[in-house]
Amino acid sequence: MVNSFDSERLTITSLCESDWTLFLKLHTDKSVIALCFDEPTRAEVRDKFESRLPPWYRGARHWLCMVLIDKVSGTRVGITGLVFDGDVAEVGYMLLPDYHGLGFATESLKALLSWCQSNHGITKFRAIVTEGNSSSERVLMRCGFHLAQRVENAYQIAGHSYADRIYSLSV
């Protein structure tokens, strides 16, 4: 089953095999991943990609991965998605650098949250952000999330320890 919905400027649709190039670029572009994770190998990215290809449904334990397509240009600009544990959906998003700062992350996350509520009855959400990723934190706050917890030295990127900032939203 292909999941698909629209926001004002985006068509948001299920990841498919033809999205491999976008997925690889998002997971290897240093400006995208600098405050997310160390650069993975191509094989690690491929494994992650393939784990997101199966059809998603409310009881699925794998990530729902949706591709963000600019309605005007038809360009694939990023991804958004979630993994649901039966109680709380953890959300995430990544955009190509040329599309940072244009409001696409906020717009797509708001659309994803609305779709989850209306189509799947999901009302509790969380997001984990590496401390220092202030752009991502602003996106979450614009979507109604609040900082629920800070976990010191939770993650290492390029040999440096970072705190995780855990945001929550209940609707």
Image (tube, rainbow, N blue to C red):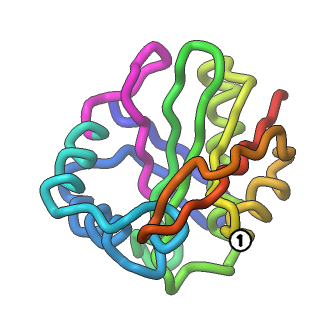
Q: Is residue 59 magenta?
A: yes
Secondary structure under tag 1 reads helix
- x and y percentages locating residue 128 in the rendered image: 63, 46
Q: Which residue is mark 1?
A: 135
Residue furthest to the left: 43
Which residue is at a point 69% across and 60% down the rendered structure image?
107
**Quadrant location of residue 151?**
top right
137 or 107, which lies in front?
137
Q: Is residue 65 left or right of residue 101?
A: left
Which residue is at a point 55% across and 80% down the rendered structure image?
99
| Image quadrant where one finds the C terminus | top right
Q: Is residue 11 left or right of residue 57?
A: right
Which residue is at a point 64% across and 54% down the rendered structure image?
129
Which residue is at a point 58% across and 51% down the rendered structure image?
6
Q: Can the viewer see residue 110 in this picture? A: no
- x and y percentages locating residue 23 in the rendered image: 31, 62
Q: Is residue 153 left or right of residue 38?
A: right
| Image quadrant where one finds the N terminus | top left
**Quadrant location of residue 29?**
bottom left
Q: Can the viewer see residue 34 in this picture? A: yes
In the displayed structure, 30 sits above or below 137; it is below
Which amino acid type is marked by label 1? Ser
In the displayed structure, 87 sits above or below 73; it is above
In magenta, the rendered stretch is 53-67
